[in-house]
Image (tube, helix red, strand yellow):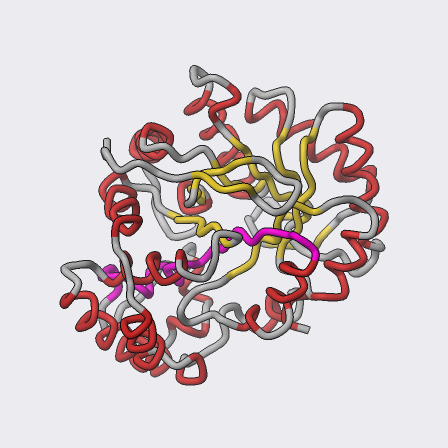
Amino acid sequence: MTTTKIDQVRLGATGPTVSRIGLGAMSMSGAYGATDDAESTATIHAAVDSGVNLIDTGDFYGAGHNEMLIGKAIAERPREDVVLSVKFGALRGPDGAFVGVDNRPAALRNFLTYSLQRLGVDHIDIYRPARLDPNVPIEDTIGAIGELIEAGYVRHVGLSEVGPETIRRAAAVHPIVDLQIEYSLISRSIEERILPVCRELGIGVTAYGVLSRGLLSDAIQPGATFAASDFRAHSPRFQGENLDRNLELVRALNAIAARKDASVAQLAIAWALTRGDDIVPLIGTRRRERWAEAVRALNLSLTEDELSTIESAVPADRVAGERYATAQMAMLDSEQ
């Protein structure tokens, strides 16, 4: 258990008060290889004990496993101590493959019913479609979540991986508290068009992939290979020459981190924290020691000169490979 005090911020103009960083739980359900439920549960407890209240999940993570894990972990905690952010809409086959998106109002009501049961709660704090459904107007999806808010089953509406036009259309239907989207030193595409719209409309950003799935850390070495069940086995950034080129950038960051007596991961988190109080990094981990490392980044201050040095060491246009495989990139409204 860490003794670092974690500050809190308002999530967007209309959202709940959340910890300055949040816990992303996806890796606890097999997205990056084998998992350990006992260690994952201990990590959730460590995060909450350290002062974190924001926990992010998806009803399709581990086909419901992630929600059940979180539900058990928080069962004896006061409900008001945890802000649950849940994504819905991704469809999976029995072999684990993703087979589409369904954001119809009837479907999301069904998804919510099962999420409430698995999490063991009577409401979800932030409910969001994981991806834009091209067959369902975003107005219909957001309107349905609004009805669930009126019924008391949901508190706030969030979005995930959508672009400026979709954000505006959604916000015209109901207040949006945050956009969840990948944002890190090596994934900065939101800065040009998406982030300005969020700030104009008073929408916060919960940034996932802050460590770029372990790339911005000491966890991956040159020539690394990944099991077929590991997301990174199918990610262009982790394949062949792309991985080698990206690790060169990480080595440059490591030299900077060493001068700060910090790890690359801590440097990456600290950088994300400087982007603004309206950006809340989600730290994805399933191990207590990694969580403790992440929390210590809150004590790492960076000067303007240091920020400039960091960004010069990792120019966005030198990152090799897209953040998702081609088929998945095509599903991202945020990349259109």
Camera-nearest residue between 139 and 111:
139
Rendered position, 2 above or below 228: above
Q: For residue 255, which quarter of the picture?
A: bottom left
Camera-nearest residue between 243 and 253:
253
Q: Quadrant of the N terminus?
A: top left
Q: Kindly identify the residue that appears in the image at 75 percent across and 39 percent down.
A: 108
Q: Kindly identify the residue that appears in the image at 29 percent across and 63 percent down.
A: 302
Camera-nearest residue between 146 and 232:
146
Q: Residue furthest front?
A: 304
Task: Let me know if residue 209 is in the magenta part.
Answer: yes
Q: Position of residue 315 (x, y in %)?
A: 39, 81
Q: Kindly identify the residue that appears in the image at 76 percent across and 65 percent down.
A: 165
| Total marks in image | 0
Left or right of 177, for residue 253:
left
Q: Position of residue 193 (x, y in %)?
A: 64, 72
Q: Quadrant of the C terminus?
A: bottom right
Camera-nearest residue between 50 and 231:
50
Rendered position, 176 above or below 231: above
Q: Which range is magenta?
A: 201-220
Q: Position of residue 204 (x, y in %)?
A: 59, 51
Left or right of 163, for residue 97:
left
Q: For residue 145, which quarter of the picture?
A: top right
Q: Kindly identify the residue that appears in the image at 77 percent across and 52 percent down.
A: 171
Task: Let me know if residue 274 is in the magenta part.
Answer: no
Rendered position, 99 above or below 289: below
Q: Position of residue 77 (x, y in %)?
A: 43, 18
